[in-house]
Amino acid sequence: EEQPKYFPYMLLAHVFTAIAFVWIYLKGKEDKPFWVQGVRYGLAIAVLLIISKFLIYYSVQPMPGAVVCKQIIFDTVGVVLIAVVVAGLNK
């Protein structure tokens, strides 16, 4: 099956996101257990990006509130887990 023509751009966007995610983490790293660092960092990123993004989407394109809440919760959990992995890899 042929990949959509926008596929390389999506892959490139994920590469840039990963680079920025790790770079910002390394700049704010403190001498604390990695999982504490990861949770703190993941929650900060969620507040900055996830929660604000879905609230803006909700105000522009009305969707059921339950859907927005689930998107915020599950994306926040995902970002926190990714942040803990990043913190664990950068002990």
Image: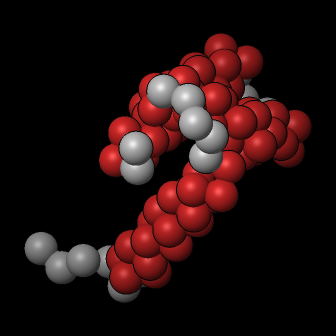
Mark yes or no: residue 72 visible: yes
Q: Position of residue 3 (x, y in %)?
A: 24, 77
Q: In front here: 27 or 54? A: 27
The residue drawn where x is 50% and y is 68% is 19
The relative height of residue 33 versus residue 20 in the rendered view (above or below) is above
The residue drawn where x is 47% and y is 62% is 18
Quarter of the N terminus within the rendering:
bottom left
Q: Quadrant of residue 6?
A: bottom left
Q: Position of residue 87 (x, y in %)?
A: 45, 41
Q: Quadrant of residue 10?
A: bottom left
Q: Position of residue 53 (x, y in %)?
A: 75, 44
Q: In front here: 84 or 26? A: 26
The relative height of residue 30 versus residue 68 in the rendered view (above or below) is below
Mark yes or no: residue 46 visible: no
Residue furthest top as drawn: 66
Answer with left or right where residue 53 lies relative to residue 35.
Answer: right
Answer with left or right where residue 64 lies relative to residue 91.
Answer: right
Count of numbered circles on the image = 0
* Rendered image coloring scheme: secondary structure
Quarter of the C terminus within the rendering:
top left
Answer with left or right where residue 16 lies relative to residue 63.
Answer: left
Residue furthest right as drawn: 59
Q: In front here: 78 or 37? A: 37
The residue drawn where x is 43% and y is 71% is 15
